[in-house]
Image (cartoon, rainbow, N blue to C red):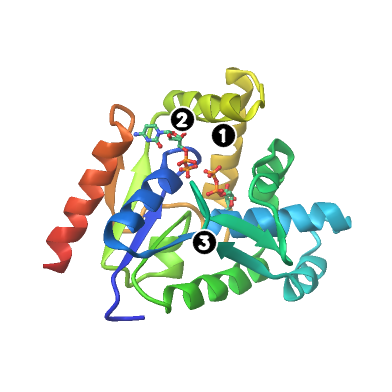
Amino acid sequence: AGKEIQIAIDGPASAGKSTVAKLVAKHFNFIYCDTGAMYRTLTLKAMQEGVELTNEAGLVKLLSTTEIKFKPGKPDQKVFLDGKEVTTDIRQPDVTNNVSTVAAIGSVREELTNRQRQIADEGGIVMDGRDIGTTVLPNAQVKIFLVASVDERAKRRFADNDAKGIHTPLEVLKQEIETRDYKDSHREIAPLTQAEDAVKVDTTPMTIQEVVDEIIQITSNKIK
Ligand code: CDP
Ligand code: CDP
């Protein structure tokens, strides 16, 4: 990478990162890389194979034989674990509630960070996650830190779940989001934090299109 444009989008759970990242990538005809899906996929595999989620050596070994692939799909790209589609499996509540434990492990992060940088080497990219602007792509020309109130984020997740037939109460979702944000922000390695040169965008009162337009505007100003 270097001459290719990199757009890093970080922020807490359900701020709208993946939704807007996909649309921004489409606008510029860039690759979209969902790094959260990579942590989720490893978490799913560890749960399936009975590997303790705090067993660093076990997880590293598991990851060394784990293939995580993104393939174009409609409406969204699909995620494959060792050749099997896991796009919806990795969004199940049990994976969501365990992923921060796996994501706290340094050597897991090191390996997934390497894979994320390889994807970024393929061309113009929009990458979303927690540590993209701070760690994975520190030279990204555009860094966005998306936030929204926890009440708004819980409502968004509730609506998403509802559409998928998952009926976790709003209060429980709010608690789960707060717990996950706390873990992600307080881990020792590459915690969730706003990069010094990131632009903070509070999406609480904004529509998806407004957020997308703002990021496109910020990017266009940077690259002209
Ligand atoms: O979409 P949602 O906000 O639920 O989360 P995600 O982006 O799918 O990420 C799931 C989890 O993976 C996060 O809560 C983090 O624990 C971890 N993650 C991370 O540590 N670093 C990243 N770059 C992306 C995700
Ligand atoms: O990736 P992240 O966890 O940050 O959020 P997401 O999975 O994109 O989910 C955000 C949800 O909020 C989606 O259902 C969006 O349709 C909705 N939403 C949004 O992303 N941005 C807004 N400004 C308003 C709603």
The x and y percentages for residue 24 are: 32, 53
Residue position for label 3: 190
Direction from residue 115 to residue 218 in the image, left or right: left
- Earlier-in-chain disc, 1 versus 3: 1
The x and y percentages for residue 42 are: 71, 60
Quadrant in which residue 221 is drawn: bottom left
For marks 1 and 3, give the one nearer the viewer. Answer: 1
Q: Amino acid at mark 1?
A: Ile
Residue position for label 1: 177
- Earlier-in-chain disc, 1 versus 2: 2
For marks 2 and 3, give the one nearer the viewer. Answer: 2
The answer to whether 141 is drawn above or below residue 4 in the figure is above
Residue position for label 2: 153
Residue shown at 38%/33% (left/top)? 148
Query: In what element is the residue under mark 2?
Result: helix
Who is closer to the viewer here, 12 or 48?
A: 48
Pointer 1 with pointer 2, Cβ within 8 A: yes
Q: Quadrant of ligand 2?
A: top left
Pointer 1 with pointer 3, Cβ within 8 A: no
**Is the residue marked 3 within 8 Å of ligand 1, measured from its CB?**
yes
Determine the CA span between mark 2 and mark 3. 23 Å
